[in-house]
């Protein structure tokens, strides 16, 4: 089913983006979500996932996932392919049953020990990666697919199309629309039933690069305006940071860190997270003290630390150095190996005299070329360091 949404089982968040016409409907009590499961505290509002597990054919896909989505916020679920992002989304929507753990919305358990609310009773809408539009139905009929046959159905469809900038295109067939327009139809269908939760699975991956940023910005603006609690799955760090009020990073079936984009970038929990959420250098250094502050002596000089993973001076650490925290100086024993010009900035890949490479990002046109002798100077503030035994990046 292309989107899963009904007016039953979850408390209303108010009149919502479509006005009071979208009131609650009562549902059969046999599918009602309970307010507590085996002593689990479910008083949280928003989405709460706790200790969620799921296996397929004996292979563990989700391994104790914990996730929190505050009401009205957008959380980006970021991770590499195969880490379990889409499986988690399907469990939230009710398309799969968890093996263990709980899923609750506004304190009401939708899935847990002895409880499973079917997808059509969750008031959760899901936009699939391929949009899943019905090619034989008009745009209007696609948008109205999850709605009832009430007298206000036509009005809801028109409002949803107006929201996504497709007024007047209700009679068109999906195959006559551009990729960006088809994506908007899928989004209109998802929001038309006024869901409590909106789930988006790689919603922009099928768009051309030139169109992706434009549509992403338009969708972001719409979601902020509507105030619908939203989870977006993506493997693109830029997309996750642009869209998310918070970003939850998944690795091997677990959420290893959840924070604001700025907090995640500045304080990654591990070397793997540091390199996954952005360009990062991990430079070996020897921990010491300078003027009463903890520092690391590295191949690019002494770097101040604010996170020290060893308890004694002389310990070896891996120091987090972002490329934008470095600056090139003409002359020295390092060599420029590559120059990558992006228009708004330039990245240099520099080979260090003692071995290894470091990436340097400057907001200027290229001012050094391949083979030039340079020095790399650290210009950032106190940074994090990880024990040399921490997980490899």
Image (tube, rainbow, N blue to C red):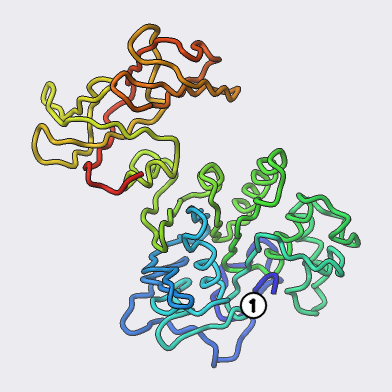
Query: Is 325 on the left-hand or right-hand side of 89?
Result: left
Q: Nearer the viewer, residue 106 or 393?
A: 393
Q: Quadrant of the C terminus?
A: top left
- Mark 1 residue crowding within 10 angstroms, few (<14) / some (14–19) / many (20+): many
- Residue 118 screen position, x and y as percent: 57, 82
Which residue is found at the position 51% from the left and 12% from the top? 369
Give the side of residue 107 with respect to residue 312, left or right: right
Residue 238 place in picture, x, y as percent: 54, 42
Q: Is residue 386 left or right of residue 147?
A: left
Residue at the image point whose x is 30% and y is 26% from the top: 381
Q: Position of residue 74 (x, y in %)?
A: 52, 55
When asked about the image quadrant of residue 208, the answer is top right
Residue 83 position, x and y percent, is 46, 60
Q: Is residue 14 above or below residue 57?
A: above
Q: Quadrant of the N terminus?
A: bottom right
Residue bearing the label numbered 1? 7
Q: Secondary structure at mark 1?
A: loop
């Amino acid at each position: 089913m292309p989107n899963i949404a009904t007016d039953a089982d979850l408390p209303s968040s108010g009149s919502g983006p479509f006005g009071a016409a979208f009131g609650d409907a009562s549902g059969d009590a046999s599918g009602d979500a309970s307010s507590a499961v085996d002593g689990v505290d479910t008083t949280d509002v928003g989405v709460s996932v706790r200790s969620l597990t799921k296996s397929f054919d004996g292979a563990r896909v989700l391994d104790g996932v914990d996730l929190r989505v505050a009401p009205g916020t957008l959380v980006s679920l970021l991770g590499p392919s195969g880490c379990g992002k889409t499986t988690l989304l399907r469990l939230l929507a009710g398309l799969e049953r968890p093996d263990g753990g709980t899923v609750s919305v506004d304190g009401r358990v939708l899935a847990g020990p002895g409880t499973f609310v079917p997808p059509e009773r969750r008031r959760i809408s899901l936009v699939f990666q391929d949009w899943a539009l019905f090619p034989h139905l008009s745009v209007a009929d696609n948008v109205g697919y999850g709605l009832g046959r009430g007298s206000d159905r036509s009005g809801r469809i028109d409002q949803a199309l107006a929201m996504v900038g497709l007024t007047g295109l209700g009679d068109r067939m999906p195959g006559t629309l551009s990729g960006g327009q088809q994506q908007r139809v899928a989004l209109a269908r998802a929001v038309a039933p006024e869901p409590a939760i909106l789930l988006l699975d790689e919603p922009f991956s099928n768009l051309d690069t030139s169109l992706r940023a434009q549509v992403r910005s338009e969708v972001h603006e719409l979601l902020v305006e509507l105030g619908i609690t939203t989870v977006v799955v993506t493997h693109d760090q830029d997309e996750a940071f642009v869209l998310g009020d918070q970003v939850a990073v998944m690795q091997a079936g677990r959420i290893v860190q959840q924070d604001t984009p700025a907090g995640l970038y500045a304080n990654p929990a591990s070397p793997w997270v540091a390199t996954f959420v952005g360009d990062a250098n991990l430079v070996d250094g020897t921990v010491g003290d300078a003027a009463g502050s903890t520092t690391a002596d590295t191949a690019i000089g002494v770097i101040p630390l604010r996170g020290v993973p060893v308890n004694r001076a002389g310990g070896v650490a891996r120091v987090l150095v972002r490329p934008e925290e470095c600056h090139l100086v003409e002359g020295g024993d390092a060599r420029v190996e590559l120059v990558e010009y992006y228009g708004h900035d330039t990245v240099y890949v520099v080979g260090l005299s003692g071995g290894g490479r470091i990436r340097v990002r400057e907001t200027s046109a290229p001012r050094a070329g391949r083979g030039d002798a340079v020095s790399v100077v650290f210009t950032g503030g106190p940074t994090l360091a990880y024990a040399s035994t921490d997980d490899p990046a």
